[in-house]
Image: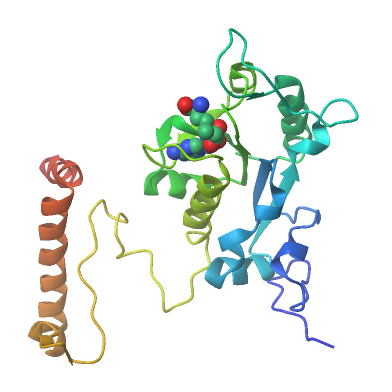
Amino acid sequence: MTPPNRSHGKQRVMQALKPRELMQDTPDYVHVWQAHVLTLFPELFPGVLGASLTGRALKESQWQLHAHDLREYGLTKHRNVDDTPAGGGAGMVLRADVVGPAIEAVQARAMGRWPILYMSPRGKRFDQAMARDLASCAGVTMLCGRFEGVDERVIEHYGITEVSLGDFVMTGGELAAQAMIDATVRLLPGVLGNAESTVEESHSDGLLEHPQYTKPAEWNDRAIPPVLMSGNHAEIAKWRREMSHKLTAERRPDLWAAHQARKDD
Ligand SMILES: C[S@@+](CC[C@H](N)C(=O)[O-])C[C@H]1O[C@@H](n2cnc3c(N)ncnc32)[C@H](O)[C@@H]1O
């Protein structure tokens, strides 16, 4: 028999379980960050979240993922979820009387601070500060749209926050949900091992990270910058800080201006 995984004092999860099995509607463990995703394609989850550090943390119940099939809330024997846009036009819109009951069923499980987010190209652009804020919540409910999106009344009625992955349009919200969950889960205490750090990486302090190098010392006539091989930790830290400033100023003048303004405060 496969030995049980580390349980972190919560319910034990067997190592033999695959990420998809882990998502089956297990009870929500207290004090474990919860992601509830409403989607027409629950089979797309955990997707990338089932791999590497987020996947291991999912197996170890450091966070939980529940993908809910919107089709289960569909109407009539055909489980219809959408209809044509009021006022005419192309495409279909997810119905309020389908999405509403789905949200209510999920929110009945919500505890503490628990936002409802709609993945939407019209929303506020997701960033590291939002990931940090989400990681400090008890959980999140993410609504993934398809087609032309969701009936506006649902967004208004439940006070849903629209969040965008960037200024482009995808066919559905699932990739956005996975990206946002990934960025959030890696900030949860204990998810990243000692080898990884969220303290010095890009966006952690509003700046981009310095360049990274590893062996071999020489590759295609390119050497690692000598200061990194010097063993002088103060000089290395200084070089990294300078490179971080240089890269941020060159590539992201918006971030650099905000950094300068913070310094002047
Ligand atoms: C084809 S899009 C709908 C676009 C919508 N008609 C509009 O113009 O704003 C279908 C779904 O994909 C998701 N989506 C598309 N682009 C996105 C983005 N940049 N960020 C987050 N979600 C996105 C949303 O959930 C959206 O409801």
Residue 64 vertical position relative to residue 237 in the rendered view, above or below: above
Residue at the image position 18 percent from the left and 41 percent from the top: 254
Quadrant in the picture for the N terminus: bottom right
Residue 214 vertical position relative to residue 57 in the rendered view, above or below: below
Residue at the image position 44 percent from the left and 78 percent from the top: 194
Q: How is the image coloured?
A: rainbow
The residue furthest front is: 90
Residue 87 vertical position relative to residue 211 in the rendered view, above or below: above
Using residue 31 as the reference point, say whether residue 75 is left or right of it. right
Write down the quadrant of residue 92 in the picture. Answer: top right
Q: Is residue 17 visible?
A: yes
Using residue 36 as the reference point, say whether residue 233 is left or right of it. left
Q: Is residue 31 visible?
A: no
Give coordinates of residue 84: x percent, y percent. 66, 18
The residue furthest right is: 77
Give coordinates of residue 106: x percent, y percent. 74, 38
Q: How many marks?
A: 0
Write down the quadrant of residue 105 in the picture. Answer: top right
Residue at the image position 47 percent from the left and 59 percent from the top: 187
Give coordinates of residue 141: x percent, y percent. 63, 40
Give coordinates of residue 42: x percent, y percent. 71, 49
Residue 251 vertical position relative to residue 111 in the rendered view, above or below: below
Residue at the image position 76 percent from the left and 26 percent from the top: 98
Nearest to the observer: residue 99 or residue 40: 40
Quadrant in the picture for the C terminus: top left
